[in-house]
Amino acid sequence: MEDSRVIREITPLMGKDSLYIADRKKKEFTYPIHHHEVFELNFVEHAAGVRRIVGDSNEVIGEYDLVLITSPDLEHVWEQNTCTSENIREVTIQFYFDMSDDGFFSRNPFYSVRKMMQEARKGLCFPIDAIMHVYNNIDSLSGIQDSFYAFTKFMTILYELSKCEGARTLATSSYAKVEVASDSRRVLKVKNYINDNYMDEIRLATLADLAGMSPSAFSRFFKLHTGRNLSDYIIDMRLGYAGRMLVDTSKSVAEICYACGFNNLSNFNRIFKKKKNCSPTEFRENYHKTRVIV
C-alpha cells in the first residue's frame, strides 16, 4: 500500500513530446524526494557534498554525478547536505521510450541501450570517465532549438553511456521491486530461492543442494559469478525488503526485523546502520519527512 504522504510528480513531458530538458544553475537543492512515471537522466556538477538518495542507496557525491532512473516507483532526491558551492549546475532530462519486446527499441541497434535501461530500474550511476566522455553533449543539449537534433544528440548520449564500463546500480533489487537476474541458471535458481525465502532461515547446505554442489564449492562459485559473498547477498536482499517496508507500511521496526529474516533486533539495527548510514527509524523518518509524489 502506497504511503498517502507520497506525491506522484506531474512532469512537464506531454503526450507527444520526446524530451523535457531542464538546465539550471542553483545554489541549493530544495526539491523533496519523489518518483515519477517517466525516465530520467540527471547530471549534476560543482556539487561536492550533496547527498544523493536513490531507493535505499544513500551516498555523498563528488564534483560530478550522473544517474539514470527508469522505474516509476523508485524514489530519488539530491539533498544539499554539506555542499557549500554557489555554482551548482543540474541538467535533468526526462523522457519515455516504449521498451516492450515488440517496440522500436527492441531492434538490434538498441541492444546495449535496452540492457542499460533495464539495469537503470534500480538507478544507474556512471563513473567519472563516462561522464567526461558525454560531458560536451550534455553541456550543449539544452541549447539545441531543433527537437529532432536534440533527440538524436540525446540518443548519442544514451548509446555512449550504454557502452561504458564501470556503471553501477544503486538500489537493491528487493527494494526497487526488480526481479533478480543472472547469466547462470544455477545462480538464478539460488537467487530465486533466496528471494522467495528471505524471511526464513537460509542454510548454505540447502543452497548448495539446489546448485548440485558441495557447500565449499558453491560458496566459491557464487562469489565468482556475483562478485559477492553469499552472506552479504542475503543480508542486502533482506535489508532491501526492510527498507521498502519501512517506507510503505506502518509496521514497527521490530515487526519488520523479524518479517525480513533477522532474528535479533539489536543485530538488525546494527547491520542496517552500517549498510545504510542511518538507523531504521531515521530511514523511515527521512523518507516520510521529505517524500513527495511528482
Image (cartoon, grey):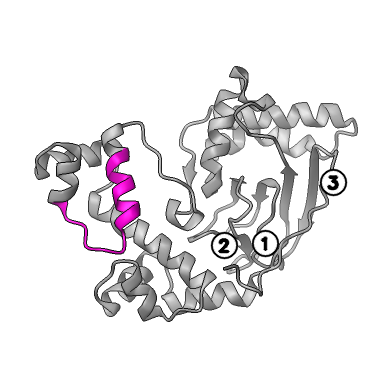
- Relative image position of residue 253 (x, y in whole percent): 40, 79
Residue in the foreground of this view, choosing between 191 and 126: 191
**Can residue 226 be seen in the rendering of this structure?**
no
Q: Are marks 3 and 1 in contact (CB under 8 Å)?
A: no
Q: Is residue 146 magenta?
A: no
Location of the C terminus by quadrant is bottom right
Q: Are marks 1 and 2 in contact (CB under 8 Å)?
A: yes
Q: Please name the amino acid that badge 1 sits on.
A: Ser
Nearest-to-viewer mark from 1 and 2: 2
> Which residues are drawn in magenta?
188-204
Left or right: where does residue 196 sit relative to residue 218?
Answer: right
Identify the residue position indicated by label 2 in the image. Answer: 49
Identify the residue position indicated by label 1 in the image. Answer: 85
For the point 71% across and 67% down, which residue is it?
7
Q: SS for tag 3?
A: loop
Q: Are marks 2 and 3 in contact (CB under 8 Å)?
A: no
Q: Quadrant of residue 41?
A: top right
- Compared with 287, 112 (above or below) is above
Identify the residue position indicated by label 3 in the image. Answer: 14
Left or right: where does residue 91 sit relative to residue 114?
Answer: right
